[in-house]
Image (cartoon, coloured by chain):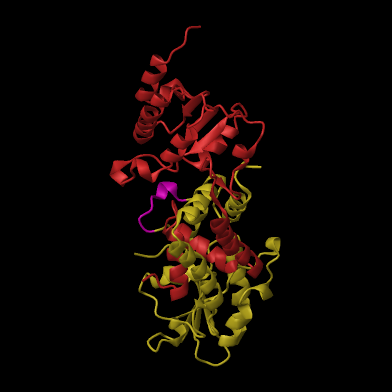
Chain colours: A red, B yellow
Amino acid sequence: MSGFTPSLDRLIEQFAKLPSVGKKSAQRLAFHVLSMTDAEANAFTQTIEKARSSIKRCKICCNLTDSDICSVCSSQSRDKSVICVVEDARDVIAIERTHEYNGLYHVLHGVISPMNDVNPEDICIKELIMRLGDDTVKEVIMATNPTVEGEATSMYISKLIKPLGVSVSRLAYGVPVGADLEYADEFTLIRAMEGRKQL
Amino acid sequence: MSGFTPSLDRLIEQFAKLPSVGKKSAQRLAFHVLSMTDAEANAFTQTIEKARSSIKRCKICCNLTDSDICSVCSSQSRDKSVICVVEDARDVIAIERTHEYNGLYHVLHGVISPMNDVNPEDICIKELIMRLGDDTVKEVIMATNPTVEGEATSMYISKLIKPLGVSVSRLAYGVPVGADLEYADEFTLIRAMEGRKQL
């Protein structure tokens, strides 16, 4: 019993279920929602409903999109011989921000994680394999996160792809640009050593 | 242009408008909302709509409630001769948690703040004055926040109340229990000195 009136308690409870929202933040968000004008509140709930009903996965790359085919897959200017495989739609945005990559993407929507009961068939791996059927794609770049599960997923997929005659690469590991060596963890340093380049 | 599909951009934008939600958190919340089941998402939006339509101000004390009269005002066991005046419904909960106060409350829903264009008539002051009409209430305890605006509001209200023959008091200032003197700010220490008690 928090002491608030029941509807307010339920509202706070809903906000507290959101990721990284604690009890105090949930209260603040609930009070904010109560203080919104009707127009603001309607915009808020309707945008949620609209987004949930209209956002779907691109039929080719599984990225989130409002149309059947996302803007990258439908673009004429992208290099269709390279696919960069990422875990999640946010990773696409991160790579797009570099303005250096001009190929296509494939969004897995997760990583293989037996601990969390996520098996290969639960993420978009078969959709990726289906894209490699003809000879258009020459290279697949694995850009899953550098975590144990990201690594394992990347290894699993590369084993499936190699027999198809498509070259598979992995993002380089190393010390982040602008970071301080002193604060780099030992695994990153080991990988940076291993991947050293002749000057 | 964030690079996300338009509906997703709009969803992120809605979350970014919430207090203390930055751009990254807004993205995380938006992705979370997209990953909810239909039942969870409906519960979320409907709880917001339900709370906004059913929560109103108690006709007596202006606290937030689902009914016309809040549970404190309608309780038979509360001491109706004391009113504790607070800025906001959360302050009621904080005082209720002490289990020491058994009087009534009055929620102002804000403080007088000319800088933010909040004048005395914008907060629930007249509702408070109206409660002091008969002789039931003997004391009003001002428990606005110890800020400049909370102080000013408290002074303003006490000047209105005193002529009505009702005694007005103010929460004591001092060092918080369990805190370290070393970290107390000078104003708190000055007030704690001024309010010192004979042992």
Q: Is residue A166 above or below residue A14?
A: above
Q: Is residue A194 above or below residue B178?
A: above
Is residue B179 part of the magenta span, yes or no? yes
Q: Is residue A67 above or below residue B69?
A: above
Left or right: B129 with respect to B181? Answer: right
Percent of width and height locating residue B138: 49, 86
B45 or A107: nearer the viewer? A107
B161 or A79: nearer the viewer? A79
B159 or A60: nearer the viewer? A60
Which quarter of the rendered picture does the N terminus of chain A lie within? Answer: bottom left
**In the orientation shown, which residue stands out farthest toward the front?**
A134
Magenta span: B177-184
Q: Residue at 52% of width from left, 27% of height from top?
A: A137
Percent of width and height locating residue B94: 43, 68
Q: Is residue B186 visible?
A: no
B26 or A184: nearer the viewer? B26
Q: How many marks?
A: 0
